[in-house]
């Protein structure tokens, strides 16, 4: 399979929770040594996604841009914000300039229809940031429906999609169905990693991706 040349700026979304968005973000960060940004972090007690990715990649602090919203409870952003007495607005967000890093990796929360407030979804933030999207999905049963719905929502808003990543035990039938019905390439099928270390992440990145030369 031909390697995907990563766009210099990229938004990682998922088909839901626990599909491997943060592991994918760590892999891309290890491979590109870019700038990571999580616009909204829900849940602080067990550490943030940025902290986990920094430990996994061993990259210095300067590779991690602060979250715009840090919400205490591990809930949907709109619910976590309400409990914190915070209101999330689309105008709150401006993507950082990654010029000195060559790559910007932005990680969303949950899927594209996760609410930010009573009117806006994560999809609205993706549209506002005008970034191409990499869709992360599980390889397990149910992924066809979830992935096709995600692609449909993104296309309905004319969002550029770079491709789909499947995480988990390879399932060729699911992969073929997503590519056929979704008219979208599965750019990588990542099997469970033996360990989450900088070397394993870099090796996995090199196997599936190529970094663009400049931003």
Image: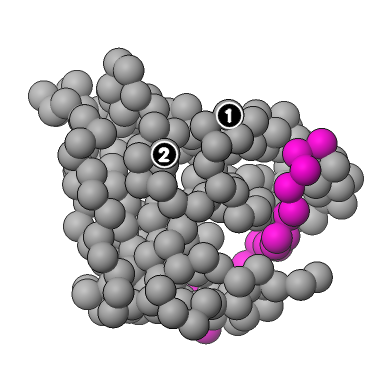
Location of residue 154 in the rendering, given as x and y in whole percent from the top left corner: 56, 36
Location of residue 16 in the rendering, given as x and y in whole percent from the top left corner: 54, 36
When asked about the image quadrant of residue 214, the answer is bottom left
Q: Nearer the viewer, residue 47 or 68?
A: 68
Residue 86 visible in the picture:
yes
Check disc 1: other Cα within 10 Å, few if <14, some if 14-19, many if 20+: few
In the displayed structure, does residue 158 sit left or right of residue 128? right
Residue at figure coordinates x 76%, y 72% from the top left: 2
Which type of secondary structure does the marked residue at label 1 adopt?
Answer: helix
Residue 192 position (above or below residue 160):
below
| Magenta segment boundaries in residue numbering | 181-199
Q: Nearer the viewer, residue 146 or 105?
A: 105
When asked about the image quadrant of residue 92, the answer is top left
Identify the residue under disc 1. 156
Location of residue 21 in the rendering, given as x and y in whole percent from the top left corner: 50, 52
Residue 3 position (above or below residue 87):
below
Residue 72 visible in the picture:
no
Residue at figure coordinates x 58%, y 29% from the top left: 156
Q: Which mark is residue 127?
A: 2
Q: Nearer the viewer, residue 190 or 74?
A: 190
Q: Farthest residue to the top: give it.
A: 118
Tag 2 or tag 1, which sits nearer the N-term?
2
Distance between the Cα atoms at labels 1 and 2? 11 Å
């Amino acid at each position: 399979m031909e390697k995907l040349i990563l766009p210099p700026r990229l938004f990682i979304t998922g088909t839901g929770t626990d599909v491997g968005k943060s592991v994918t973000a760590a892999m891309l960060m290890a491979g590109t040594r870019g700038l990571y940004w999580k616009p909204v972090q829900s849940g602080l007690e067990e550490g943030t996604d940025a902290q986990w990715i920094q430990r996994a990649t061993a990259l210095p602090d300067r590779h991690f841009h602060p979250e715009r919203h840090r919400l205490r409870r591990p809930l949907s952003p709109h619910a976590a914000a309400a409990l914190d007495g915070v209101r999330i607005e689309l105008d709150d967000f401006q993507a950082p300039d990654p010029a000195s890093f060559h790559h910007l990796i932005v990680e969303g929360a949950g899927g594209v229809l996760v609410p930010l407030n009573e009117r806006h979804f994560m999809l609205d933030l993706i549209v506002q940031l005008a970034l191409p999207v990499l869709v992360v999905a599980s390889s397990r049963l149910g992924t066809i429906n979830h992935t096709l719905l995600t692609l449909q929502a993104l296309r309905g808003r004319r969002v550029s999609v770079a491709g789909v990543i499947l995480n988990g035990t390879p399932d060729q039938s699911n992969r073929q169905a997503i590519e056929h019905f979704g008219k979208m390439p599965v750019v990588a099928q990542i099997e469970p990693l033996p360990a989450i270390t900088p070397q394993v992440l870099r090796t996995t990145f090199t196997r599936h991706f190529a970094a663009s030369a400049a931003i």
